[in-house]
Amino acid sequence: MSGPLRRLRRAELPVDTERLARFLVGKILVRDDRRGRISGRIVETEAYVVGDAACHAFRGPTPRNRSLFLERGHAYVYFIYGCWHALNVCGEAAGTGAGVLLRALEPLEGVPRMRRRRGVERLTDLTRGPGRLAQALGIDRRDDGRDLCSDRRLWLASDGVPAKQLRCSVRIGISREARRKLRFFEADNSFVSGPRRLNRGAGSRVVAAEGEG
DNA sequence: AGCCAGATTTTCT
DNA sequence: GAAAATCTGGCTA
């Protein structure tokens, strides 16, 4: 059910953060180093769009968020709650701050290393949630600003398999602009984070996919 | 299955 | 000095 990996080119990334958030569900995030490869299928994203008070770029560039203003396809990695990192993909033209938070992966390669890094056994505890996935892949501030369309260590790929059914809901863990439905995920995928009420039933609705697999 | 409190530190007001 | 795009373990609010 998965073909060979093909690196995503910048030209095929939508030039719009909300569309990019939909586009990235079903794509692959790859971590390569001398010990081998860790990869996972992106099953949940959130868009933090232009003019959005919940977006870290809303009040303009600071030392922390400056890479969020890079051209689409670059990484913005921030540190939060004293112990976690989270990975975003920039979604607009250079100079415009907006991006897509990668919230959950379905593990593909490198599961033993993910287990060691996370200190847990259960497959669904490895990469379910933004902090967990960053820890499983060893992502930290050193990855901030990488170009995911050209970097050797951290990059985006497609295996040609599209997401089955895409749904959207409100975003998780924010207070500002909390009603906007900018969270996207694959329906009925057990690696998606968040409360059940958002993932099943009336808390979410079906949306059209963005592009091919 | 759902909800809550505590951990922990950077960042900006 | 408070808030923060979270996670974990424990209790049933």
Image (cartoon, coloured by chain):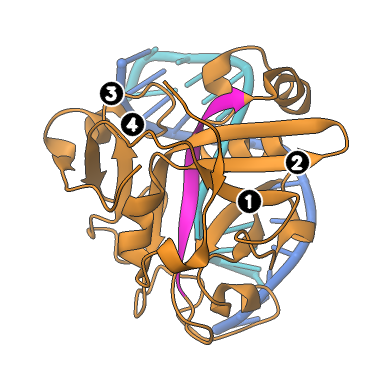
Chain colours: A orange, B blue, C cyan
Question: Which numbered disc covers residue A39?
Answer: none
Left or right: where A87 falls relative to A187: right
- In the picture of the structure, the residue carrying the numbered disc 1 is A155
Sort mark 4 into few (<14), some (14-19) or many (20+) by Cα contacts within 10 Å: few
Labels 3 and 4 within one chain: yes
Q: Chain of mark 4?
A: A
Q: CA distance from mark 4 to mark 1?
A: 29 Å
| Marked residue nearer the N-terminal end (3 or 1) | 1
| Numbered disc total | 4
The C terminus of chain A sits in image quarter:
top left
- Alpha carbon distance from label 3 to label 1: 26 Å
Q: Quick check: A92 left or right of A210?
A: right
Q: Position of residue A136 (x, y in %)?
A: 68, 33
Q: Amino acid at mark 1?
A: Trp
Question: Eyeballing the image, is A119 above or below A13?
Answer: above
Q: Position of residue C10 (x, y in %)?
A: 57, 15
Q: Which residues are magenta?
A: A98-108
Amino acid, disc 4:
Pro
Residue at label 2? A32
Circle nearer the N terminus (4, 1): 1
**Mark 2, secondary structure of its residue:** strand
Q: Are marks 2 and 1 in contact (CB under 8 Å)?
A: yes
| Residue bearing mark 4 | A195
The numbered mark 1 sits on a residue in which chain?
A: A
Q: Nearer the viewer, mark 3 or mark 1?
A: 1
CA distance for labels 2 and 3: 29 Å
Q: Are marks 3 and 1 on the same chain?
A: yes
Secondary structure category for the residue under label 4: loop
